[in-house]
Structure formats: C-alpha cells, structure tokens
Amino acid sequence: MTTTTARIEADEHVPMIHIYREFAASPAQLFRAHTDPELFARWIGPADIGADIDYWDARDGGSWRYTAGREEWSTSFRGCFHTVSPERLVQTFTWEEMPDAVALETLTFTDLGDGRTLLHATSLCDSFEARDQWLASGMETGVSEGYAALDALLEDGTV
C-alpha cells in the first residue's frame, strides 16, 4: 500500500482550513466513500473511535448526523448536504460540543490520471478562534488515521 499523508493548512487571511490528500483511487471511489454511510462509518477517524450513523441522506438538501466514540465517551457531528455531485461535495459541519461553530465544507475530487485522485477539502469556519480550536482538537490525528483506513478499504476492493 502506498502511504501518503494529509497536508493540513490554516489560511492566514480567512478562518479556513485546507486539507490536501492524494489517493490511489478514482474520483468515483472517493465520492462513494464520502456519500455511502456504511463506508463512511468504516473509515472516519481516529482509528480507536467507532462511528455510528444516526441518519445520512446524501443528496442536495439532505442532512446527516453521526456519533463517534468509545464505550466510556461519545460525541456527535451533524450537518446538511448542499451540493452532492461526483466532482464536488458542499456541506455544513457542526461538532455538537461547539454548536455555534458551523463550518461550510467543500470537497473536490481531481483526477490526476494513472488511477490517482487529489482530494482537496476546505472548511470555512465562523471565526479564527473556532478554526484554531478545531485544529487543536486532535483533528490532524482523525484525518490521518481516517484516511489510512480509507486507503485500506480502497486497497482491499471494498470501495
């Protein structure tokens, strides 16, 4: 398996987070991994935390919610899908422990050829403070471990 790491950058001009990650996959495979609730629950990180989908309606105007956690602890995330297309997903994202900090996320899947795709995700936060709290929350671990799990699902043909 080829291991790649996600590059996570905080924009210095607007309260935005950029995530770049290359995958040995087609754009269609990455789109499916982000819109199929059963697949999403299998790879979303961190690795030591499970995810249970409460509801998931991946269509323009649909909504979603999942709970992540371990036996002794859990937290939930929710949002609305605004645009669901094979090249681009636009959704809101709310961590329910910070309910007033709603981010607007955009994911694009760019075909690089040779069976590789670049995922570029942006999260536009309400404020620089909210953005910095997200960055300090362990997000990097969740992104890295989640994408490693997605790599494994891609490699074994699940996605």
Image (cartoon, rainbow, N blue to C red):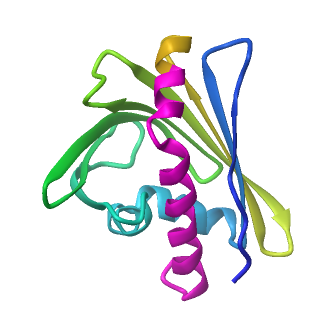
The kind of secondary structure the magenta stretch mainly shows is helix
Left or right of residue 72, residue 76 in this image? right
| Quadrant in the picture for the N terminus | bottom right
Does residue 112 belong to the magenta stretch? no
Does residue 153 belong to the magenta stretch? yes
Q: Residue 59's x, y, as percent? A: 39, 45
What residue range appears in magenta? 131-159
**Figure quadrant of residue 12:** top right
Q: Is residue 128 above or below residue 68?
A: above
Q: How many marks?
A: 0
Q: Residue 96's x, y, as percent? A: 25, 30
Residue at the left extreme, as displayed? 72
153 or 30, nearer to the observer: 153
For the point 50% across and 26% down, which residue is it?
104
For the point 56% across and 46% down, which residue is it?
140
Left or right of residue 75, residue 72 in this image? left
Q: Is residue 49 above or below residue 109?
A: below
**Figure quadrant of residue 135:** top right
Residue at the right extreme, as displayed? 113
Q: Residue 109's x, y, as percent? A: 69, 52
Q: Residue 121's x, y, as percent? A: 63, 41
For the point 38% across and 49% down, which residue is it?
58
For the point 52% across and 62% down, which residue is it?
145
